[in-house]
Image (cartoon, rainbow, N blue to C red):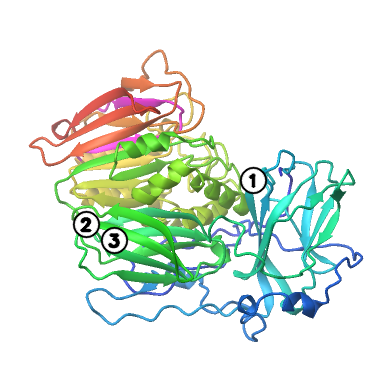
């Protein structure tokens, strides 16, 4: 429901910005305090006293819940669930989920379950709207009440929620409500000109699943036939079902950042549950299975990143997801790259701009069998500074079946552009950037998130002797205009220069959400201080084998950017856009400082790079493919020409 809601903005955060140099056995990677500028979920809105429509007394409401659901509910102690996860745990260099130690070492103990506090600090509601023709609503003000006066508004700020057949999630932090005072689960409707029918409501207190009611049929509205404005669950707080989702594993697995001996896997659950990742080496099946265990926390929207280390280079792996002791049958499958610096044959696919909910192109990408897939921005279109809205769009993107299948079986890397940052053409001055970073960290398992003193989404990865440098062109970007304006922070530029200087890779891929060549719109050309500094650094320091990757512009290009001067060579640029969005026509003429090799517009597309560094003259074949897999452009790059 597109309606204004209360959010909180403040100081910016640097949570989890350090590189993930994780040990194989560490603390669980769960939870974290919200940065002040993270548009943290709203607290309850006190309402005027209303007539108690529940016949249940407080104790009866709590007694209705099964004993297992309420274990620890009334334990005295800290208001923070013990071992549910903290920023310190998540950010620690040795901070992967605990698991069996490799190579026969004594296993570390599994992290214990959290002890839930007697006062509710973080309330989560997940509600499924019915799939009947008139079950959804876009004109109703709804809330859930746990007492006569403590009611919680159901509204995700920049989302059209309450759509037929969909599940919406609502987080509230800082609730500070004694569990013992909860005497109802009541739904209230106000100004309900358009009726709404929920079919399932579930609730978590500090992550603990305490309530689930399925099979509901009540129609909420403002007095039409069969409509009610208030309804109280006659069973009170109870668990009549396990979850409103089809599975307690709601999203994932997603195979994220990889090295030759490391990888990451992200999953999301419906609540704080015991999640085990059981990892097997499919190349050498006799290798002992590894098990990592964690308890996802509501502060991260119940996402959990597992950092896998001590893996073997160029080996296949399968990671089974087990929740509360049961195999979900979900598998993450991947192959680790060869050792850094080793000659490789690598197929890499990439793309940008995924707005449409129908995304069949991901099946076409999967059919190309890439070893690595890179999302270079506009990976969703939340266009919002609101944390809950950003979480909603990340969840929705993983609910696209074609996309979910690809990311479960193909290692991926990601950066953002403007629409999945906080809005169109946004920069460092735009409100909500720390909320965007928090959501990105929760859902995008990449090697690192900028640097501790310079947060963002930039990072480096390697695949044999191919290095990838993925840039953040939003978090530190100046507003355009002055000639001194910069595209990236001084710290990010210095980081990139240092990494390029140290790299001995045959090919060095630089990925940016914004394109490097002229477009008539947003471009590095609008920031000459940054563009000239980067290009001059490449020339003066004789950085060889550079290939530029970008997205954003809703058409795909193969270009060569002209460079002159001692040590210069024309810089190839591969632009891939859109994956699932409207697409514009190609320009009639070439841009002034770039030679256009090929252009494809008017339909969805992606790019594939076939890189072979084993050849006497190593080669990149860059291809543009449409949604059916038909080639629409090709550019061949020889290492001998990139020097």
Report, in whole angstroms, how far the alpha carbon at label 1 lies from the one at label 3. 38 Å
Dot 3, how many residues are within 10 Å of its Cα: few (below 14), some (14-19), or many (20+)?
A: many
Above or below, 637 relative to 146: above
Q: Residue at x 21, y 38 (%)?
A: 611
As helix, strand or loop, the secondary structure at mark 1 comes to loop
Question: Which quadrant: the C terminus?
Answer: top left
In-image side of 6 versus 220 (left or right)? left
Dot 2, how many residues are within 10 Å of its Cα: few (below 14), some (14-19), or many (20+)?
A: some
x, y (%) of residue 80?
60, 77
Find residue 557 and report its image quarter. top left
- Is residue 554 within the magenta segment? yes
Q: Residue at x 41, y 46 (%)?
A: 405
The nearer-to-camera label among 3 and 2 is 2
Q: Which mark is residue 262?
A: 3
Q: Which mark is residue 315?
A: 2
Q: Nearer the viewer, residue 614 or 507?
A: 614
Question: Which quadrant: the N terminus?
Answer: top right
x, y (%) of residue 161?
68, 46
Give the labeled residue for mark 1.
165
x, y (%) of residue 632?
33, 22
In-image side of 136 versus 244 (left or right)? right
As helix, strand or loop, the secondary structure at mark 2 comes to loop
Q: Nearer the viewer, residue 116 or 525?
A: 116
Dot 1, how many residues are within 10 Å of its Cα: few (below 14), some (14-19), or many (20+)?
A: some
x, y (%) of residue 463?
24, 49
Above or below, 100 relative to 504: below
Task: Give the magenta-colored segment's residue range.
Answer: 544-564
Mark toward the start of the polypeptide (1 vs 3): 1
Q: Nearer the viewer, residue 484 or 318?
A: 318
């Amino acid at each position: 429901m597109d309606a204004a809601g209360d959010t909180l903005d403040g100081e910016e955060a640097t949570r989890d910005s350090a590189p993930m140099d994780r040990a194989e056995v560490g603390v669980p990677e769960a939870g974290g305090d919200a940065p002040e500028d993270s548009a943290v979920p709203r607290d309850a809105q006190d309402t005027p006293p209303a007539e108690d429509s529940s016949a249940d007394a407080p104790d009866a409401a709590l007694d209705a819940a099964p004993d297992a659901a309420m274990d620890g509910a009334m334990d005295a102690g800290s208001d923070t669930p013990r071992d549910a996860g903290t920023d310190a745990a998540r950010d620690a260099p040795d901070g992967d989920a605990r698991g069996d130690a490799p190579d026969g070492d004594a296993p570390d103990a599994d992290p214990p379950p959290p002890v839930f506090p007697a006062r509710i600090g973080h309330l989560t509601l997940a509600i499924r709207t019915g799939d009947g023709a008139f079950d959804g609503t876009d004109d109703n003000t709804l809330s859930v009440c746990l007492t006569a006066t403590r009611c919680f508004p159901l509204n995700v700020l920049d989302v059209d929620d309450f759509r037929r057949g969909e599940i919406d999630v609502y987080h509230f932090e800082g609730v500070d409500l004694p569990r013992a005072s909860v005497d109802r689960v009541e739904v209230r409707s106000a100004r309900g000109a358009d009726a709404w029918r929920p079919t399932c409501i579930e609730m978590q207190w500090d992550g603990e699943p305490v309530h689930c009611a399925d099979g509901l049929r009540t129609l909420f509205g403002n007095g039409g036939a069969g409509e009610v404005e208030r309804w109280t669950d006659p069973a009170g707080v109870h668990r009549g079902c396990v979850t409103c989702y089809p599975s307690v594993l709601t999203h994932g697995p997603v195979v994220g950042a990889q090295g030759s001996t490391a990888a990451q896997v992200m999953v999301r659950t419906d609540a704080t549950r015991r999640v085990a990742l059981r990892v097997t080496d499919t190349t050498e099946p006799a290798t002992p299975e590894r098990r990592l265990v964690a308890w996802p926390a509501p502060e991260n929207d119940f996402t959990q990143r597992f950092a896998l280390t001590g893996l073997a280079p160029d080996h296949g792996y399968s990671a089974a997801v087990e929740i509360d002791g049961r195999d979900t049958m979900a598998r993450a499958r991947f192959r680790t790259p060869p050792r850094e610096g080793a000659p490789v044959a690598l197929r890499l696919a990439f793309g940008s701009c995924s707005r449409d909910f129908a995304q069949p192109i991901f099946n076409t990408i999967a059919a190309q069998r890439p070893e690595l897939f890179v999302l270079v921005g506009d990976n969703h279109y939340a266009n919002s500074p609101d944390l809950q809205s950003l979480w909603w769009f990340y969840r929705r993107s993983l609910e696209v079946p074609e996309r979910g299948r690809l990311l479960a079986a193909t290692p991926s890397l990601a950066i953002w552009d403007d629409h999945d940052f906080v809005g169109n053409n946004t920069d460092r001055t735009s409100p909500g950037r720390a909320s965007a970073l928090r959501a990105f960290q929760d859902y995008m398992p990449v090697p690192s998130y900028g640097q501790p003193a310079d947060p963002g989404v930039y990072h480096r990865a390697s695949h044999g002797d191919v290095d990838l440098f993925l840039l953040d062109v939003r978090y530190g970007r100046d507003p355009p205009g002055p000639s001194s304006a910069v595209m990236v922070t001084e710290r990010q530029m210095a980081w990139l220069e240092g990494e390029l200087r140290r790299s001995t890779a045959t090919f060095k891929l630089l990925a940016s959400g914004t394109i490097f060549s002229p477009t008539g719109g947003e471009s590095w050309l609008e920031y000459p201080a940054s563009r000239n500094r980067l290009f001059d650094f490449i020339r003066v320091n004789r950085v060889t084998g550079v290939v530029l990757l970008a997205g954003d512009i809703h058409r795909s290009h193969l270009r060569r950017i002209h460079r002159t001067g001692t040590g210069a060579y024309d810089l190839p640029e591969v632009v891939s856009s859109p994956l699932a969005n409207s697409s514009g026509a190609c320009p009639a003429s070439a841009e002034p400082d770039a030679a256009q090799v090929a252009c494809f517009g008017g339909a969805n597309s992606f790019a594939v790079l076939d890189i072979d560094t084993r050849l006497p003259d190593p080669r990149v074949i860059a291809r543009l493919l449409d949604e059916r897999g038909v080639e629409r452009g090709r550019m061949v790059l020889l290492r001998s020409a990139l020097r």
